[in-house]
Amino acid sequence: MRKFDTKVQYLKYKVLREVARLAWQGTLWENVLNIPKMIVPGKTPTMRCCVYKERAILAERVKIAIGGNPENPNVIEVIDIACDECPAAGYEVTDSCRGCLAHRCEDACRRGAISFDQNHTAHIDKSKCVECGQCAKVCPYSAIANRKRPCQNACKIKAISINGENAAAIDNEKCIACGACVYQCPFGAIMDKSFMLDVVDLIKQSEAGQNYRLYAVVAPSIASQFTYAKLGQVVTGLKKLGFHTVIEAALGADMVAYEESKELAEKGFLTSSCCPAFVRYVQTAYPELAEHISHNLSPMAMIAKYIKDTTENAKIIFIGPCTAKKMEVQLASVKPYVDTALTFEELQALFDSRDIELSELEEDVLDNASFYGRIFARSGGVSEAVAQAAKEHQITDFAVKACPCDGIEACKAALMRKKRNTLDANFIEGMACEGGCIGGAGCLTHGDRNKAQVDAYGKQALEKTITDAVSMLHSVQ
């Protein structure tokens, strides 16, 4: 039974599970230093040079699992001690250098960073090199390679650099918290902070008789996760975990599509507001376009606001694939409605920390949204939903002309074209993760099959139109 894509995810999960297990027992803080020893006993083979370094790194993972560095506002953190196995980044001369006489690389370098030894083999002076890549372009043997690290390759907005200690460093001003670096780092040296302990505390207080209802708002991409169990069993598991009610964020998506179609018709041009990483990217990289971001809340915040407006003493936990949601819930515009956010990885750890075996549970029902709300989980879904909502609103004097952007590079291209007034579209659907939310860093599994599962889940919706779904809002109280 494979629950995760990679062994790095599994290691991260084990730390989260043990932290949660001790938190349920109320013995976390007196045992927190023992967690690395629980996971890596003395004679267990490790991937590091010795068991002591392995435990030191695990201790850092534990810190992030219990909230991370409070002085760092970003939810993405680098574990410096674990970031020492990658080769030095930048352009390097490989063994393919033939020591030719042409020396085109030297001629192309404007910084004088290229020199040659007695065998005419080229060398790059890193103190002078500015990583322009001109030398690599002109080498007839392709002997100069750009040794980018996996985290740098994953970060398409260039928010990651290498510091003086040869470890990754994140520029918090540029970072959009998408988590691409978290998923791609082969050593798990970059992690997202967990606020799982807040959830454990809320559940324990609820079980102790606190007068509030605990709601789990689950992202529609959940349909492609927990593949070893049925979705109805996951719903039962959430209630067994301690949640009073489980609601689809897809219902919030229906609400957003309903309102966003009207806003688009009124303003003539919009960018979507659903993906917090995309919204952050527009605000930081294209501030002149920020005025075009839809004024609607995200689906998560939209449904959470409705619940809190209509239900006394409600506490709301969002559960989804997105690390950027952990930043979104801290925004002043969202914080009153969503108490905290979990990823699917963290939810799996919570289930197992309480020995809840999903595949053995009876099935409950999760049906509060339309097909269109559910397909917000994959690229193109928001555009389809907004177009459908416009049709249901009978907006006949305005045609939705969407530009769905699959991944942050596609978002960048669309925003650049809009900035230059060459974009033939009036609605930009921005999804920072490739594939959409189904490619989020907090997913248990990633891949093309997730799209088919989300579409199949959407077709199971009893509410066939967005209007039908929105009219069912009274059922969530």
Image: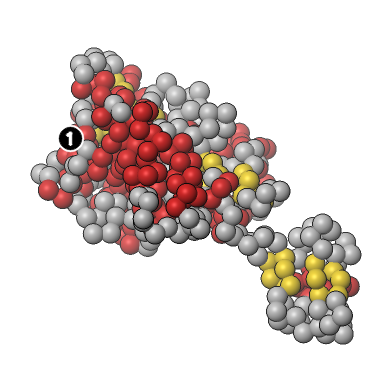
Is residue 207 or residue 418 the one in the foreground?
207
Determine whether the residue tagged by mark 1 lies in a helix, strand or loop. helix
Name the quarter where the N terminus is drawn: bottom left
**For the point 54% across and 45% down, which residue is it?**
79
- The residue under the point 33% across, 21% down is 308
Residue 136 visible, this angle: yes
Relative height, residue 454 to residue 60 (above, below): below
Residue bearing mark 1: 240
What residue is drawn where x is 48% and y is 55%?
A: 50
Q: Amino acid at mark 1?
A: Lys
Judged left or right of residue 353, residue 298 is right
On-image quarter of the C terminus: top left
**Residue extending furthest left?**
362
Which x, y percent locates residue 172? 62, 38
In the picture shown, does residue 103 fall above or below 287? below
Neighbor class of circle 1 (other Cα within 10 Å; few <14, some 14-19, many 20+) is some
* Whole-percent x, y for residue 280 in the image: 56, 38
